[in-house]
């Protein structure tokens, strides 16, 4: 089972899972994360995009106690390109 197939319960649980994914990407670096995920299937890429998007928008990625309202387009443009070309 991967993080993408983890039942997050919907709503806030999925926001938290998305936030965890974004923190992993920040730690590994976008290019290294792409190397890990570039062989996912189309359904997994759709899930990945959804989780990352909510994690960036609703998560507190810089640990300042507030939602960040970040977008995947600006934070991870290379990853978004990979996702869009594989859906």
Image (cartoon, rainbow, N blue to C red):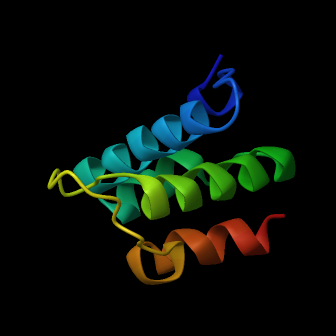
Residue at the image point whose x is 48% and y is 52% from the top: 55
Residue at the image point whose x is 41% and y is 72% from the top: 70
Residue 87 in picture, x, y percent from top left: 84, 64
Residue 86 in picture, x, y percent from top left: 79, 65
Residue, far front: 66
Residue at the image point whose x is 64% and y is 70% from the top: 82
Q: Quadrant of the N terminus?
A: top right
Residue at the image point whose x is 74% and y is 73% from the top: 84
Q: How many marks?
A: 0
Residue closer to the observer: 71 or 24:
71
Residue closer to the observer: 5 or 17:
17
Q: Is residue 70 left or right of residue 12?
A: left
Q: Is residue 12 left or right of residue 7?
A: left
Residue 16 in picture, x, y percent from top left: 46, 37
Residue, far left: 64
Q: Is residue 75 left or right of residue 73?
A: left
* Quarter assignment of residue 29: bottom left
Residue closer to the observer: 65 or 57:
65
């Amino acid at each position: 089972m991967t993080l993408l197939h983890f039942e997050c319960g919907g709503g806030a649980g999925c926001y938290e899972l998305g936030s965890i994914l974004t923190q992993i990407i920040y730690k590994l670096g976008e290019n290294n994360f792409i190397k890990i995920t570039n062989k996912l299937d189309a359904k997994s890429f759709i899930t990945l995009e959804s989780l990352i998007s909510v994690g960036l928008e609703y998560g507190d990625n810089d640990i300042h106690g507030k939602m960040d309202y970040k977008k995947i387009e600006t934070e991870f443009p290379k990853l978004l390109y990979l996702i869009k070309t594989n859906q």
